[in-house]
Amino acid sequence: MILTILLFALTGLFLTAGGAYLAVLGGSAFYLFSGVILLVSTVMLFRRKSAVLWLYAALVFATLGWAVNEAGFDFWTLAPRLDIIPPLGLLLLLPFVSRKLTASKVALLPLALSILCTLGVAGYAITQDPQDIAGSLPSVAQQGEPVTPGDTAEAAAGDWPAYGRTQFGDRFSPLTQITPANVKNLKVAWTFRTHDLKTANDPGEITDEVTPIKIRDTLYLCTPHQILFALDPATGKQKWKFDPKIKYNPSFQHMTCRGVSYAETPAVTPVAAEADNTAAATDAPAAPAAPADDCTARIFLPTNDGRLIALNADTGELCHGFANNGALDLSDGMPMKRDGFYEPTSPPVVTKKAVIISGAVTDNYSTHEPSGVTRAFDVRTGKLLWAFDAGNPDPNELPSATHQYVANSPNSWITASYDAGLNQIYIPTGVATPDIWGGNRTPQQEKYASGILALDADTGKQVWFYQTVHHDLWDMDIPSQPSLVDIRQKDGTVIPALYAPAKTGNIFVLDRRNGNLIVPAPETPVPQGAAPGDHVTPTQPYSQLTFRPKERLKDSDMWGGTMFDQMVCRIMFKRLRYDGPFTPPSLQGSLIFPGNLGMFEWGGLAVDPVRQVAFANPIAIPFVSTLIPRGPGNPAHPDPKAGPSGSESGVQPQYGTPYGVDLHAFLSPLGIPCKQPGWGYVAGIDLKTNKIIWMHRNGTTYDSSPLPLPFKVGIPSLGGPLITAGGVAFLTSTADYYIRAYDVTTGKQLWQDRLPAGGQSTPMTYETNGRQFVVSADGGHGSFGTRLGDYITAYALPEKTQH
């Protein structure tokens, strides 16, 4: 009895105090109400008044009504509203309490009924999912005459020769051996251990995000420290490896390699090489006649210490005719050359003439960092052919004795797409760093920020540019490789389209010939009132194909593991500035939703260009952005000997601006998202109508809760999907350690298997010796908090059940 009284008293005090504060802030008064009733109940329990049973029954019924009114019949949103008050009511029904309150069993009935009603509502709610969208994507037969994908000739059916299989970035394989009917039979075919693991000298952001490539009889992949492996695709046995021995330290923001690129460079005569270089860029300095190639097929490996290395694809030896004995120094022409500030983390685009590369620049460190320039180099010799430096009024100006690239030009940190037929490269651009302050950006730095830039691949000249966020103060860049898809219209014509998923949740659909919108994206008013010295634009483009939240968050959308931390989250929400999407960063602290992590990240879409459908894995995690004025402990300039910040979250200095910034996910005191689930989904899109046809929560709490319970709340993912002509899509990337297969038509999960570590990567598939394999890199993600490892896992059907 004493313990029960103590529990009632403490719960009542906490809910009363916190509820009063929340009510003053304009939030729900129910926490205050329930706290007061609990305190009254405590007094009645102490006095052993049987009327407490009636009073508490009324409180349970009131709690149930309040919970259903706010949350509907979504079990996971109901749970934190019902996990304290009804269980305390159960204590009152226990004999050691109830015997001391009344001799009449009839007095227990109202409270028992209230708890039974609560259990009934919870039982019904667990069978419902109000967030689920059911539907079926069309089949090829329903679509009419199939479209022949424009990248069909780029890859043999059984190969995966580029990051997105082809440079169209569709992550689509025409293989059909694995189907919805037999995918349940997939088994591990082989596992390869790279033995490349986190060291004491690594930053927190060490990640294994690689998508391997496969050409004929070899699989190529890189590790977080950019060690390149060549494997036998049938057995996973190592053929060779190359270690670039990168220079790094814990101050680097990234330690990752998303992939490598492949190019075939048949031997040419010096005369032919010279002519080839001249044709590549008529206004760029012509490369000297190339020596006889020592690599007729080569792998291009970007390294986080700012190099691009060319290797013989057959042997792993350096291609000595490329740049400086096989290695190109990407710091040439940069306004600063300190290790860690410029990190190419994604594979370059390769054309017949050029290798074209961009790179990540340290976020939110200072206003004097390397340029985000995109450059094209001769694919054989490494000679600079052209540059596009977005911060320069003449973006094609090449470095010279009197000119360097412009500091803090908007960069592109993810792989671009390439249409060989149009000879255009499509570059997803970011914003001039620092990301969260724009008061001192130049008009030129704003011109090409946060959008899609189309360039002529031979000259680097602009073809078109479309900006997806104006004056970006939220790091809402285009985070993934655009997908190029040829879409058949109702009149039979085919439009070469580009699909660009953005962190905002918008998917911008453009005609890739000219950048004209195919799906409307009207300019829409957004919140105003930037911090002193900055500004926001009146409007932002809102694509009509979007996963962007339809409504603003409310305090009733806040969540927690219990009623206690849910109340705290509601208090935190009410204390922040939040006016909907594009709420400006502020000194008060602003809630940013979609958050800085984005609704889409670097994984992008997977597109079946024949069925004209797409598979997506959007996420929904709010962030908090708080500007920190300069003052004691927040100097305006860095220590000259200091390295980068070593992180993209937490306190970021933003040297050279009036403010630092504190960036972090909006989490409860227990470390779980304050926004109610789901936090991660899978979704199917009909590309002929540009409509979302189905969407389901994806992933469980198995690896992120104190107890390994697989509650399917829908959890965040970092990585991308794979789609096949067999009608099956694959996805790893969630915060629980699984690879999953889905029916493309309905999104139904068909199969899953436990991974040995976090799978924050994008899987790929290929065929060898008549057998289809699906391969995943399972090495985890430091800042995402998943288990680190060094595994490459290949799945296949048992040979007797392949057909």
Image (cartoon, rainbow, N blue to C red):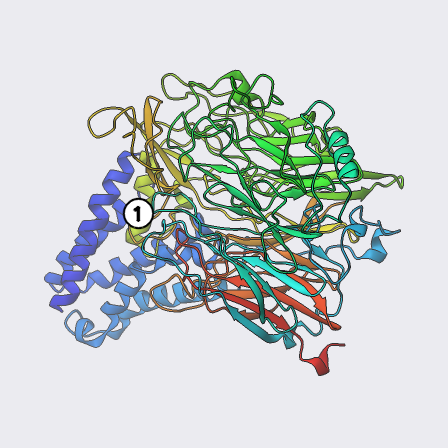
**For this rendering, which residue is in front, 325 or 475?**
325
- Under circle 1, the secondary element is helix
Left or right: residue 762 versus residue 88 is right
- From the top left corner, tell me how far across and down residue 25 is, in percent: 29, 34
Quick check: 517 above or below 482? above
**For this rendering, which residue is in front, 44 or 715?**
715
- From the top left corner, tell me how far across and down residue 244 is, in percent: 49, 52
- From the top left corner, tell me how far across and down residue 412 is, in percent: 55, 36
Residue lying farthest to the bottom in this orientation: 800
Left or right: residue 657 versus residue 771 is left
Q: Where is the C terminus found, in terms of image quarters? A: bottom right
Residue at 71 percent across and 55 percent down: it is 172
**For this rendering, which residue is in front, 149 or 715?**
149
Is the residue marked by circle 1 packed among few (<14), some (14-19), or many (20+) residues within 10 Å?
Answer: many
Residue at 77 percent across and 40 percent down: it is 420
Residue at 39 percent across and 41 percent down: it is 648
Quick check: 537 above or below 436? above
Q: Where is the N terminus found, in terms of image quarters? A: bottom left
User: Quadrant location of residue 539?
Assistant: top right
Is residue 128 something one can see in this rendering? no
Q: Which residue is mark 1?
A: 567
Quick check: 408 above or below 197? above
Q: Amino acid at mark 1?
A: Met
User: Quadrant location of residue 231?
Assistant: bottom right
- From the top left corner, tell me how far across and down residue 622 is, in percent: 43, 42
Is residue 722 something one can see in this rendering? yes
